[in-house]
Image (spheres, rainbow, N blue to C red):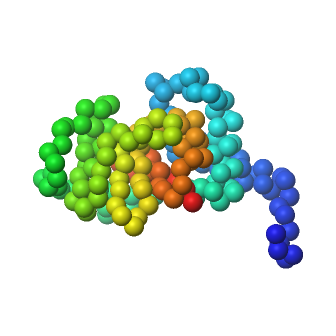
Amino acid sequence: MSQNKKPLLWHMVEKQILKEMNWLRAVIETSPFNNETYAPISCQECLLRKIAVLIINGKVHAKEIKKAPPLESFWFNKTKRAKQKERPVIIHGAEWHNTTMEKIENHFLHQKYEVEREPNLHWGRADLGVYKNGEKDLYIEVGTTSFFKLLTNLNTMRNCIYLIVPNDNKLIEFTCS
């Protein structure tokens, strides 16, 4: 620590942790079917706190990206599939989930990215993995996730982006350093 910087007082750090926890609680939806009781840590407040500490420590950068009013979608609206191996229709989750996964997949395929469905993570699977030489790997969760899965993967993943797409109007981006 440099001589000019003073450590923050504990109550200031605690205030920032609570602010991040409240933000996480507000922007991330957890699935009613993805019960945290099956995870090794089931205390939601404990998980939120650990994720908030990762953000405050700078190990993970987090931001919410809201769709600007003139923008119709975050994803290219291409009706034809990108030229790549014929890919089967996605049958995974509800209709919105499937349609959104296909839109995102096509968006990246048209930009010459490699797209993998349901890549393995340290804990569980993402809905999509998006890769291109020279760029950070991108793992995408469409809809809901669990705080345990998010914490575990943010703790173990390096030099990648973990993107949560909770709905058509916002994205939650976690960049792992």
Q: Residue at x 25, y 32 (%)?
A: 91
Q: Is residue 36 above or below residue 147?
A: above
Q: Is residue 54 left or right of residue 76?
A: right
Tell which residue pokes out farthest to the front in this image: 133
Q: Residue at x 62, y 27 (%)?
A: 40
Q: x and y percent of residue 51 in the render? A: 63, 46
Q: Which image quarter holds the N terminus? A: bottom right
Q: Is residue 82 left or right of residue 97?
A: left
The answer to which of 150 and 10 lies nearer the viewer is 150
Q: Is residue 141 above or below residue 40?
A: below
Q: Is residue 166 above or below residue 79?
A: above
Q: Quadrant of residue 45?
A: top right
Q: Which image quarter holds the C terminus? A: bottom right
Q: Residue at x 44, y 51 (%)?
A: 163
Q: Is residue 90 above or below residue 159?
A: above
Q: x and y percent of residue 85 in the render? A: 16, 48
Q: Quadrant of residue 98?
A: top left
Q: Residue at x 22, y 59 (%)?
A: 110
Q: Is residue 30 left or right of residue 17?
A: left
Q: x and y percent of residue 173 in the render? A: 48, 54
Q: Quadrant of residue 92?
A: top left
Q: Is residue 17 visible?
A: yes
Q: How many marks?
A: 0
Tell which residue pokes out farthest to the bottom in this image: 4
Q: x and y percent of residue 10 in the render? A: 84, 53
Q: Is residue 175 visible?
A: no
